[in-house]
Image (cartoon, rainbow, N blue to C red):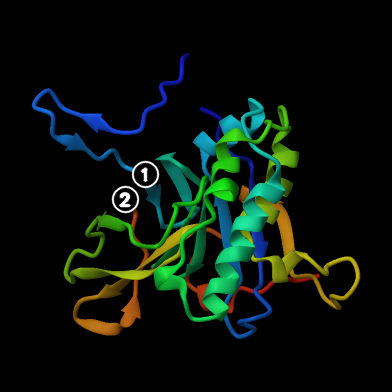
Amino acid sequence: MIEPKYRIVYEDPAFPDHPAKILVPSPNWLEDAMAGNLPPVWVHLQLKDDEEQAIAEGRLSTFRHDEEKWMLQFTAPRIGPLTEEQAMEYLLMKDVPRRVWEDYQDGANRTRFKIVLKEQVPSDRTFRDAWRLTE
Amino acid sequence: MSIVKFGTIQNGAGVQVYPAKAWVSFNGTGTIAIRASGNASSLTDTNIGSYSVNFATAITDVNYSYGHSYSNDVSTQHTIGFWGGQATTSCAVVHYNAQNSANVIDKSFVLMVVHR
C-alpha cells in the first residue's frame, strides 16, 4: 500500500482562534487516485454545496442528496491516474472547506493552507493549540 | 479484480445484511496516520483528541450510525470518546479525560465504522 508523503495544513478563516488543522490522506484512497478511479472533483463539490445550503437553512436532519447527483460519485467518467501531488490538490478541493482555498488567488491576504511533507508537521503535540501557519 | 454490484444482500435464511458504509483505523498521536480504511479519503486532525473522518463518497443523508472505539493510552486515567458531529461527507469524534472533562487527549488507536 502507498504511504502518503504529504499532509495539508490549513487554517479555517471561520475559526481564526483555532489551531491549524492537519489533513492526512488515506493510503487506500491515494491508491485509488493514482490508479485513476476518481470522478471529477466537481461531483464532490456540488454535493458539499447542497449539504452546506441545507445546513445554512437549518434542515440538515431531513436533508437527502439528490439521487442523480449522488450517483455521479460512481457513474461519472473517471478522470484517469493522478500523481501523488495531483491527488493532494484534488483532496484539497474535496475535503478542505471551500472558504480556505477558493479565493486564495484573488482575495486572501495571508497563507491559509500549505501542502507539506509529513516530516514537516510537528509530531510533538505539547503546544498543539499554538500551531499556526507561517509565511 | 472484479466489482460486484448489488441492491440488497441477504444471508442464507433470507435476512437482509447491512455492510459497513465506511470504516477507518488510525493513529491519532504524534504523526497522525491512517492505518487502513474503506470509503475514507482523509482524516482531519482538528485539535487535541479531536478528529474528523472525510468519506471518499458521501452518505445519502445524515441518518447513519457510527460506532467508535479507542485505545486507553493513559495508564492511570481513563478517557471517554464522544460523538463530535456528522454530515453526509464526514463524521467527527472527540476524546476527553474521564477525570477532568476540561482535558482532551490524543489516542493511538481510533477505530470507527459507519452503517446506513
Q: Which mark is residue A8?
A: none
- Distance between mark 1 and mark 2 Cα atoms: 7 Å
Tell me the chain of label 1: B
Could you tell me if residue B98 is visible in this image? yes
Left or right relative to A114: residue A68:
left
SS type, badge 1: loop
Q: Are marks 1 and 2 on the same chain?
A: yes
**Residue located beneath label 1 in the image:** B21
Position of A114 relative to A103 (above/below): above
Neighbourhood count class around disc 1 (C-alpha, 10 Å): few under 14, some 14–19, many 20 upward: some
Q: Name the spot of residue A60 as percent of width and height, x first.
A: 46, 72
Asked if the residue at tag 2 contacts the one at tag 1, i.e. Cβ–Cβ closer than 8 Å, the answer is yes
Left or right relative to A107: residue A13:
left
SS type, badge 2: loop
Counting the numbered discs, the total is 2
Left or right relative to B88: residue A56:
right
**Residue located 54% across and 80% down the image:** A57
Amino acid type, label 1: Lys
**Residue located 57% across and 30% down the image:** A31
**Residue located beneath label 2 in the image:** B116
Amino acid type, label 2: Arg
**Residue located 39% across and 68% down the image:** B49
Mark 1 or 2 closer to N-term?
Answer: 1
Could you tell me if residue A120 is visible in this image? no
Q: Nearer the viewer, mark 1 or mark 2?
A: 2
Q: Name the spot of residue B69 as percent of width and height, x first.
A: 24, 56
Position of A83 relative to B51 (above/below): above
Q: Name the spot of residue A62 as percent of width and height, x first.
A: 41, 70
Front in this rendered view, residue B34 or A13: A13
Tell me the chain of label 2: B
